[in-house]
């Protein structure tokens, strides 16, 4: 991965115009923020932990750049700060009182809270990230809890992002491991995009693809050094996480950064998996297990020769829509069931439409297999990478049994309209066989 990739990503991103990812980048932060967000007043929003890590140095850098500063807003370090509307409103009030441009100093939660507060106040903001814990720094939208329900609020990404590699390398190892888990999603997620491209459902945007995928292998190549907090190893990981968000901005959607592996994670999140832990089970840790599940599913899929499949017969054998809707309603409750019905309906095809969709993939299967193999790693390789990074490498690392993961496969397929390997197998009539293969033969 090169900073040239970062520059071209910034050129296409809709909100973010500047990013500094380097050792010592904190000392550049004042200059960068002044150049893109003016001389202030600026309001630093942190918690006690992130303030201790970088608050004074950020303040100093802003002062050196001639910026005016409001009194910082520092949340307590304990209990854990939640991404809730109430907390975001506290920030909004501070922005209004100081008539200031907010600067998020922290990781996921602080960034999401400031992102939403800035948006609600009609202001741009900057983010100084303190951990390589997820790819949401540069993403638009903020996942929030409101009245106990999770929903992603629309809002703009930061104008400037600063990630000092010495700071992020010193963050708690569990945070780095979470970011690693979020970045491995680009492996099966990219494979899902390849399949959506072959079936002409969502053609690959080559520039966006390069942004997200070109550096992933390098970024993931030093898991043990990342776990050890070796600052030299963080370049690729942090740039990769930033590029994911920028690619989503450029593309106008989340396809470049996520596929079915994220649906396992979202559904576990909805179930409240690991919410009682301190800290709560991270997004990246759930994504890591979702990614393992999907890499195993791909192994099962690639072991099949679908070049000879009789598509007319597969289409004829497909369950009619009523049966599918009944199946969805047996798996989900309430509003989530209605959501899954809508999402699945949007991608449902039958008869000639189904044959037409799958035909190019089946006709070019050997070429597709070659591309997918180049994109993917085996489940064994991925679990070793995750283990070395200190991330979950087996379901029980996040408190799940193999059967729990197995039961999530059909739900992950129904949950979103995005077309993935799960849909390909489902439409070909081999979904259940492949899931059985995953747990009986591949992922042990
Ligand atoms: Zn993610």
Image: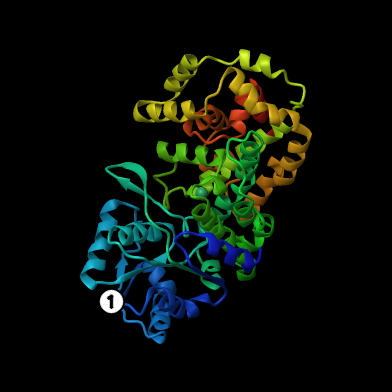
Indicate the position of residue 67 as horizontal and vertical percent values: 36, 82
Determine crowd level at label 1: few under 14, some 14-19, many 20+ residues with C-alpha closer than 10 A. Answer: some
Single out the residue that lies furthest toward the left.
Answer: 97
Q: Is residue 126 left or right of residue 87?
A: right
Q: How many numbered marks, from 0 up?
A: 1
Specify the quadrant that holds the N terminus: bottom right
Percent coordinates x, y for residue 183 in the rendering:
58, 52
Instruction: Inspect this view and state whether residue 39 appears.
Output: yes
Instruction: Using the rendered image of the protein, determine whether residue 135 is visible from the camera's viewpoint.
Output: no
- In the picture shown, does residue 34 fall above or below 406? below
Q: Is residue 327 left or right of residue 101?
A: right
> The C terminus is located in which quarter?
top right
How was the colour assigned to the protein in this rendering?
rainbow
Q: Specify whether 10 is left or right of 373.
A: left
Comparing 301 with 279, the one in front is 301
- Asked whether 391 or 151 is in front, the reply is 151
Residue at screen point 43% across, 79% down: 30
Note whether ligand 1 is within 8 Å of mark 1: no
The answer to which quarter of the image holds residue 420 is top right
Q: Position of residue 141 (x, y in %)?
A: 40, 52
- Front residue (pair 204, 144): 204
Could you tell me which secondary element the residue under label 1 belongs to? loop
The residue located at (54%, 64%) in the rendering is 11
Residue at 35% in and 29% down = 335
Task: Identify the residue position indicated by label 1 in the image.
Answer: 70
Q: Position of residue 353 (x, y in %)?
A: 59, 22
> Where is residue 405, by image quadrant?
top right
- At horizontal 37% and vertical 85% (from top left) the residue drawn is 66
Camera-side residue: 289 or 421?
421
């Amino acid at each position: 991965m090169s900073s040239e990739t970062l520059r071209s990503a910034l050129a296409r991103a809709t909100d973010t115009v500047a990013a500094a990812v380097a050792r010592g980048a904190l000392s550049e932060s004042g200059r960068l923020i002044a150049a893109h967000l003016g001389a202030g007043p600026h309001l630093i929003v942190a918690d006690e932990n992130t303030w201790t890590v970088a608050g004074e140095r950020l303040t100093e850098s802003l002062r050196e750049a001639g910026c005016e500063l409001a009194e910082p807003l520092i949340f307590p370090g304990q209990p854990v700060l939640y991404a809730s509307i109430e907390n975001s409103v506290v920030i909004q009030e501070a922005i209004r009182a100081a008539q200031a441009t907010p600067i998020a100093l922290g990781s996921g939660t602080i960034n999401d809270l400031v992102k939403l507060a800035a948006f609600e106040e009609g202001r741009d903001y900057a983010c100084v990230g303190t951990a390589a814990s997820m790819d949401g720094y540069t993403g638009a939208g903020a996942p929030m809890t409101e009245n106990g329900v999770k929903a992603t609020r629309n809002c703009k990404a930061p104008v400037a992002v600063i990630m000092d590699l010495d700071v992020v390398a010193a963050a708690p190892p569990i945070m780095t491991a979470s970011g690693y888990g979020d970045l491995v999603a680009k492996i099966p997620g990219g494979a899902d995009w390849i399949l959506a491209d072959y079936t002409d459902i969502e053609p690959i945007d080559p520039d966006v693809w390069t942004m997200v995928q070109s550096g992933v292998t390098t970024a993931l190549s030093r898991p043990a050094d990342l776990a050890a907090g070796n600052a030299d190893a963080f370049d690729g990981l942090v740039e990769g996480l930033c590029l994911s968000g920028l690619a989503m901005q450029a593309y106008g959607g989340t396809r470049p950064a996520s596929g079915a592996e994220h649906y396992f994670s979202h559904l576990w999140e909805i179930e409240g998996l690991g919410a009682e832990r301190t800290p709560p089970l991270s997004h990246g840790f759930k994504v890591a297990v979702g990614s393992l599940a999907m890499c195993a599913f791909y192994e099962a899929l690639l072991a099949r020769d679908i070049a000879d499949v009789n598509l007319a017969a597969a289409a004829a054998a497909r369950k009619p829509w009523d049966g599918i809707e009944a199946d969805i309603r047996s798996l989900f409750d309430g509003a989530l069931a209605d959501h899954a019905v809508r999402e699945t309906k949007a991608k449902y095809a039958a008869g000639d439409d189904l044959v037409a969709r799958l035909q190019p993939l089946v006709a070019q299967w050997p070429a597709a297999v070659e591309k997918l193999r180049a994109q993917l790693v085996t489940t064994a390789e991925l679990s070793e990478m995750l283990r070395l990074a200190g991330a979950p490498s087996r379901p029980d690392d996040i408190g799940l049994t193999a059967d729990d993961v197995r039961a999530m496969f059909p739900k992950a397929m129904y949950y979103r309209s995005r077309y993935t390997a799960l849909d390909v197998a489902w439409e070909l009539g081999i979904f259940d066989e492949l899931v059985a293969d995953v747990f009986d033969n591949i992922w042990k």
